[in-house]
Structure formats: structure tokens, C-alpha cells
Amino acid sequence: MSDVLERPGVAAAAGTAGTPLVRLTDLHVKFVTRDRTVHAVNGVDMRLDAGEVLCILGESGSGKSVTLRALMRLLPKTAKVTGGIEVGGRDVQAMDEGTLADFRGGDVAMIFQEPMTALDPVFTIGRQIAETVQRHERASRAAGMARALELLELVQIPSAKRRLDAYPHELSGGLRQRAMIAVALACRPKLLLADEPTTALDATVQIQVLLLLRRLQEQMGMGVVFVTHDLGVAGEIADRVAVMYAGKVVEEGPVDAMMRAPLHPYPKGLLGATVHAGMRGKRLTTIPGAPPALETLPAGCAFAPRCSEAEPACLEGVPALRGPVPGRLARCIKVPGSRMGQEP
Amino acid sequence: MSTIDQDRGGPAQPLLGLRGLKKHFPIRGGMFGGAVATVRAVDGIDFTVRKGETLGIVGESGCGKSTTARLLMRLLALDAGEMLFDGEPVGVNDQAGGIGLKDYRRQVQMVFQDSYASLNPRLPIEDSIAFAPKVHGVPAREAAERARDLLAAVGLSPAQFARRYPHELSGGQRQRVNIARALALQPRLVILDEPVSALDKSVEAQVLNLLMDLKEKFGLTYVFISHDLNVVQYISDRVLVMYLGIVAEQGPVDAIYDRPAHPYTQALLASRPAMDPGKRRMEPPLTGDPPNPVNPPSGCRFRTRCPFAEAVCSERVPISADLGGGHEAACHMAVPGSGHSGAGRLAA
């Protein structure tokens, strides 16, 4: 177990000298096909320090998953990516195929919503973990299998030894999710990318997996970027939250401050529209309309057409990020504070 | 259930009464394709739906909530059990004092989770809504008019939307169309199977508000099925908690959420993420996944995950204990003298 948790030199490499683990600068992603162009991500700046958990919160089409996939260069060929993507001080955009293959699964790993599609159905769980270890650490098959057993124990799979020989379809949903986490953690990544990993799970299983991820993150000191549409999930796992809307970050800040008193009208509306205890009998506040189609970029604030506080000035130009309090940012002209393009 | 035959058609008569509802699915296999195992999806459930109420059904995957919805709609045949709609047996011909399936299905309609799969992609939405009334003998012109009125009622301007196809609408708009279609036959009971689960939060709130408005406007009764405990609490008058094909607990919404009696309900409620990062949970309320309904545990089906399980729990199936005010829980701890050391702790 201790062997799995040991992380040689990672903290030293990424955490010191103020080098962030992840730095996105002015990231743009558009999908170009013959019929149309979709502007999925439109200028995202983001940083993540080693050992930090950042939740990207947004609805479908907000660009949250595209941003996540760009970090690992998992986007299809139709995607045109511009801007800076740095992980652990290395330029991901400049990597060649060989470097990328070492990088994926070694330095950065990803877990998905659907473990059934992320795991290979024709290999046992044990083989899939061992394969990752053999590939990245040039370990023997036996050493790979030994690590696989440790990992299954680490993710709290009961009767781990027996489960090594199980195929994905033989496991329940919660165990499959744990097995996928084990594959992802096989080479002790510095950065874990999580794309709605608990959305498809039942309530009693979701909380188990969230608590497991939180514990593993603390033990292994990983940085985590966690994409979700669920405010409650963000509340359970995030240190910081970045709220995305129409391909831009509209608010960013520490999770407790954001959930207590959001600055931007969109997360404010989202909080009001999320049903929770004590709302019975009250009419839900809603955000009228639907998110914009991203074929043409709006000239002003993308949220203005749905915003109850919008005024003509909102449509005149894209609002800059403003920082009313240190550590918090919001992209709204009504938020007090100095304009700033970058984080302070 | 002795009141079930009294006051036929009156306000005290439950709109829907169910007794001993069962649905088992055989798993076929082996050399001759015989049944090798049985999934006990719904394994003997009793409940009533009162007129004008919203009954919420919650539970995890595999608990039988969607099978229950399909049984209520008679999209699946019952293996056993009785259904009374406003006092009349369902599926019996009307000479015998029952209500035939065609007439029953006119009065009971359903909305599904997948808004796209439930609409015919080749029909403009107006025609989809008018389809069922035409089948039931409403003249085409009148049916089209009704479709346009309903589109307006669900907040989609007929002039703008009537001739659109399903793929030209967003998920929230499509779900509004499905709701309009369900109302086209002027039903009395609408079964909503995870109607907002596939929608974004901002759109979910719009659809929930709409459902509340329509219920009042048309005097509807809802059965609302969801895995989202917060949504069920928000919309329901009474709540039914299912676990592995049986009813674990049922009662008025406040009783279930403020004083849950069944350990499963307690764990389910405790599993909701805290909306406050200062109150994060440290230990999961339950370990493991729900067991497979193919071979449910003996006695109490929850005992394999229950922190209070004792010998009696594996020996005897708990009966539903009355906790007062229509609140019932199927747990040995709720029954004084059941042989469980915590018995009677919860009795009223």
C-alpha cells in the first residue's frame, strides 16, 4: 500500500517555485465541419496548483468537458485548439505522439462517467491495471499484477484478489467505477481529470465514490480537475470552483464563498434553480430560456439574453473578469472591483 | 385496503388502488432456452394514489420503480395483483363493472425520461400531440386545435413551434411537448417516470414549475418517479421508498423526510450531498451497491447493507408497521415484540 502512495519527486517538480500544475492561457476550441463551426471554448484561463481540487461547473454545452479533454489532447481532429496548455510546466500542444503516449496515463489520467465504455470488455480488471503499469514503468507482468492487487485494495474493492480476474461486466456499477479509478491511479498521476464520474451512480454509491476520491486525492496529493453539473457534488469535493457558460469562465473562487454568495447572475440563478430541502411549496426561481447555440459568438455577455439584471451596456462588449475580493473573479459588469484579465 | 370498494367514484375513493402487485422477469439460458433464474423486479407491493395528490416514488436503480410505472400504465402485464381505478377493476370488460384497458389508458398517461426517444422523429410535434385524440375518435380538426391549445399551455407558442420536428427542439422544449401529449387525452392520472432527470438544472426548475401549474389548472393526479430525493421532496405530497422490488417505507412527505423510520430511508437521505462545504460528510452512510434482484436476500431485503441487522432480519420478512398518519415502514425495529433488540423504538 505504501508503495502505491509514494510519489517520487512529483511534489518537488510541480509544487515549488510557484509553477502551477496546470496553466491554461486563453484556450479556444472550435469544432469545424463542412456545414458549421461550433465555438465550444472561447478564451479560458485557468490554473491549478499541485494537490488542489478544482471543479468546473456548467450545464451541457458550456464547454466544461471540452476544456477537460483539451488538457490531455483527447479532442477529435475536427477540433481547432489554440492557446496555451501547460501541465507540470510542459507544453501539451507541442508534444509529439510518443511523448503524449507517455504523458497520458503516466502524468495525467482521466476517469469518465461510463466505466463500461472506458474499460475494455475483453480483458480482466487485473490485466488492464497491470498493462498500464507495464507500459509506463517497464515493470514485469508479475509486478504489474501485484500493483493491481494493491490498487484494488486502495479503492476499497471487497475481495480484491478474486476481483482481479473479473471482467468489467461481472462487476456492479459502483465497483466498476472503483476499478476505473484504480486503472487511472496505476502510475500515480500528478493530475487526475474526472469527467462527471459519479453522475450515473445511485445516491448511496455516489457519496461512497466521492468520499473515496477525496481521500485518495489527499493521500496521493494529486491535483484534480473535476467536471460536474451538480452543485451538490462540487460542494462535497471542490477546493475551488470555476463556473462555465457558453465556453467562458463566468465566475471562479473558493467553493464555500461561491456556494454561500455567488457574484455572477448565472451561478446565482443556478443556485436558486437547484431544488434542495426547505423549498417545498415555494415556486422555483428559474433562468428563462436556454443556453445559446455556439455557432456565432455573441458580441456582448453571452448570458445577457437570460439575465434578469441585463442592461444595454451588457451587449456592448464581452465583460472582463473582475476581482472584487482576492481569490474571486466574476465576468459581469455589475460586479464591483477592478477589471483584470488575469488572476491576481 | 377495506375502504377500496366504498365510495366508488367519490372523492374519498383512491384514484388508483394496488394490491399485491408482482412482476417477475425470467432470465432465459441453457441449452433449451428455459428460465434459469428470475428477476423479481416488483415483488408484491401495495399502495394507493389519492385523488389530486402527487405520490413520489424514490429508490435506486434496480429497485423496481420503473417497472412499477410500466405496470401502472399496463405496458407490462401483471404477474399477480389487483388494480382498481376509481374503484373499478382495471382490464376487466365494462359489463362486469370494470374498466377496459383502452378506456383506462385514456385516463392514465405517461411521460418518460428520454424526451427524444418518446417522440416520433418524422412527425411535427403538433401531429404527435394530436395523434392519440384522433385514435380515440376526436375529429382531426378538433384534435389539431387541442394540440395547439396544449402547446400554448406548456409554454411553447403554437405559431412558432407547432410545425417543428423533435430534432429542432432543445431537451427542455421536447419534454414540454411530451407533457402536452400526455395531457391530450384529458387524463386524470399522469405517471411521470424521471421526467426531469435528463435536463439541465436551470431547465429542470422550469419544467417542475410547469408541472405544478398544469396540475392545478387541469386537476391532475401525479405519480412522480425519480432517483432525485430533493426533487421528490419538492413536488410530492406522499412518498413511497422502494428497495429491491418491495416498499420499504411510505408516508406523508414531511414524515418521510423529517422522521424516516426505515434504516434504508435514513441512509438514502443521508447520502444527499450537503449543499454546504462546511458540512461535508466524512463516512458514507452505506457501503456496497444494491444487491441483484435475481436472488434477493432472505427475510428483510435490506439486511445485507443494514447497520442494525440482527438474526431475526434474515429469518422473517418484516411486515409493514403502522407508525400513524399513514406512515408505514417495513422494518422489524418498527414492530414492538418482533424479536429485534431495537423493536418498538419507533412505534408511535
Image (spheres, grey):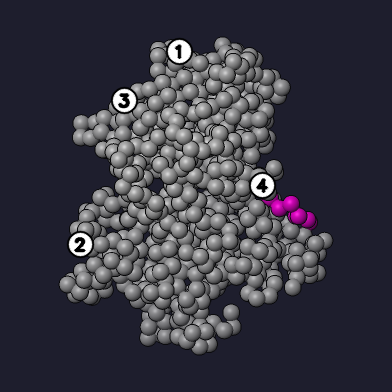
* Residue toward you, B295 or A311: A311
Q: Disc 4 marks which amino acid?
A: Lys
Taking the spot 39% from the left edge, 26% from the top edge, the residue there is A26
Instruction: Compute the Cα span from label 1 to label 2.
Output: 57 Å
Name the secondary structure under disc 4.
helix
Question: What range is drawn magenta here?
Answer: B305-311
Q: Residues within 10 Å of mark 1 (few under 14, many from 20)?
A: few
Instruction: Compute the Cα span from label 3 to label 4.
Output: 42 Å
In which quadrant of the rendered image does the C terminus of chain B lie? bottom right
Q: Are marks 3 and 4 in contact (CB under 8 Å)?
A: no
The answer to whether marks 1 and 4 sit on the same chain is: no
Taking the spot 79% from the left edge, 66% from the top edge, the residue there is B345
Taking the spot 34% from the left edge, 24% from the top edge, the residue there is A81
Residue B159 — which label?
2
Q: Are marks 4 and 2 in contact (CB under 8 Å)?
A: no
Name the secondary structure under disc 1.
helix
